[in-house]
Amino acid sequence: MAEAYDLVVIGTGVAASKIAEACRSQKWRVAVADSRPYGGTCMLRGCDPKKLLWGVIEAADRARRFSGSGIEFENLKISWSKLMQFKRSFLSESPRNVEERFHSLGIDTLHGFAHFTGEHELEIAERKVQAKHIAIASGSKPAKLGIQGEQYLLTSDDFLELDELPHQIVFIGGGFISFEFAHIARRAGAKVTILHRDSRPLSHFDSELIEMLLKKSSRVGIDVKLNCQVEGVEQIGSRFIVHAKLNNTEAMFSADAVVHGAGRTPDIDHLDLQAAKVETAGTRLKLTAGLQSVSNPTVFAAGDAAAMGPMLTPVSELDADVVSQNLISGDPTHKPNYHGIPSAVFTIPPLAGVGLTEEQAKKQNLRFRISKAEISSWYSARRLKEDTAAFKVLIDEETNRILGAHVIGPDAEESINIFGFAMQFNIPANKLHHLVPAYPSEGANIEFMV
């Protein structure tokens, strides 16, 4: 006989946890289900472990930049195995801690793949459950590339578990994953190549700042091949050959490892959605603006599984708040507002952006002015011996509101948050001139950027 719940949440990441805890606070009977260790992508296989690696690599890179300027060393190097030990020391207890928190709140924890057997029914590792409401927060997975030898590709999960760093790595795709891991791997001693299918990697960011990042990547030894369409991967002994067309000419790239960095899609294939009459469009769920299934009102989705906003952890949290409100109120009219949410790619230095790019603003025929500068000569960059730093801010001519902001350089991932805050709360750009920041800090630059 099936166990009955008010809510079953598929997943145990940021979005899943928020939804489960919010509904449990209303005395609902709640269960969560996950086939993987509890904690989700961001905590265990994404943002958090990546930033741990980046922090150590960036510290070593900074030390190298300061060689001869107060720091003296010989043969500074990264021990990849010890770096992995450091990362695991943060994460080894996380799944147990997450599950114990669920238990402390009275939330049932189920382990195994969940799949629908009806509009209100699920089966999880041969355990049958019924639920008045079901929330899909199962995260995302690497997109299928449809190339020969795809089985040889390492995923981002695999890269973050490498006990030894391969000597030569090829990354397929020019998105967040490839650039972040390429900057980490190169500075840890690997030879690195990125293969991107068109002329514009990191397409969510400003084109001029991307060009600066490409030049920086080249200077540190990362070989970025644009207009390079990968057609297949072949294994020969312990090595791999990537077959591609580079500017329509046959090309081959040899590597010890090939990493998939060409995008992610909602991880929903295993759910047997047809059994629940949950409609999809390609790899995505069909959802209302309130993140509810258009065909089965029992079902909601949040975060990467919903893919209604950018695949970012703060978006997952925002989605979870909306789904929780809609579930608890019984009135699914709340909807997320993705305006003014910043994102950052953790290269060295980082590149960050929020809102519209210049190209997007022009396509919308908006009237705006641009404030921009290359600022590697400013104190904030010079004191860190960073040769790549710039900004571009788009400001509406009529309202003086910020339409978009883009920054590359030290602590760009922090300064972009101020622009995001201004956009979210409609703070005019001229008000930022009255910001009284700590000094010296990156925030002290803001008034000179608008």
Image (cartoon, rainbow, N blue to C red):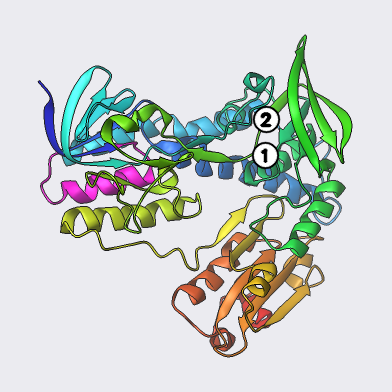
Q: At 75% across and 52% down in the image, what residue appears?
A: 200
User: In the picture shown, does residue 153 fall above or below 73?
Assistant: above
User: Mark 1 near mark 2, Cβ–Cβ under 8 Å?
Assistant: yes
Q: CA distance from mark 1 to mark 2?
A: 9 Å
Query: Which of 8/232 is in front?
Result: 232
Q: At 68% across and 19% down in the image, what residue appears?
A: 149
Residue 187 located left or right of residue 275? right
Residue 338 located left or right of residue 236? left
Question: Is there any visible trace of residue 383 in the rendered image?
Answer: no
Q: Which amino acid type is shown beneath numbered disc 2?
A: Val
Residue located beneath label 2 in the image: 259
The quarter of the displayed image where residue 171 is located: top right
Q: Where are the magenta residues, as a range?
A: 10-29
Q: Earlier in the sequence, mark 1 or mark 2?
A: 1
> For mark 1, does the 10 Å Cα neighbourhood hold few (<14), some (14 to 19), or many (20 or more) residues?
many
Disc 2 on helix, strand or loop?
strand
Residue 216 place in picture, x, y as percent: 81, 53
Residue located beneath label 1 in the image: 181
Residue 304 place in picture, x, y as percent: 44, 45
User: In the picture shown, does residue 250 fall above or below 204?
Assistant: above
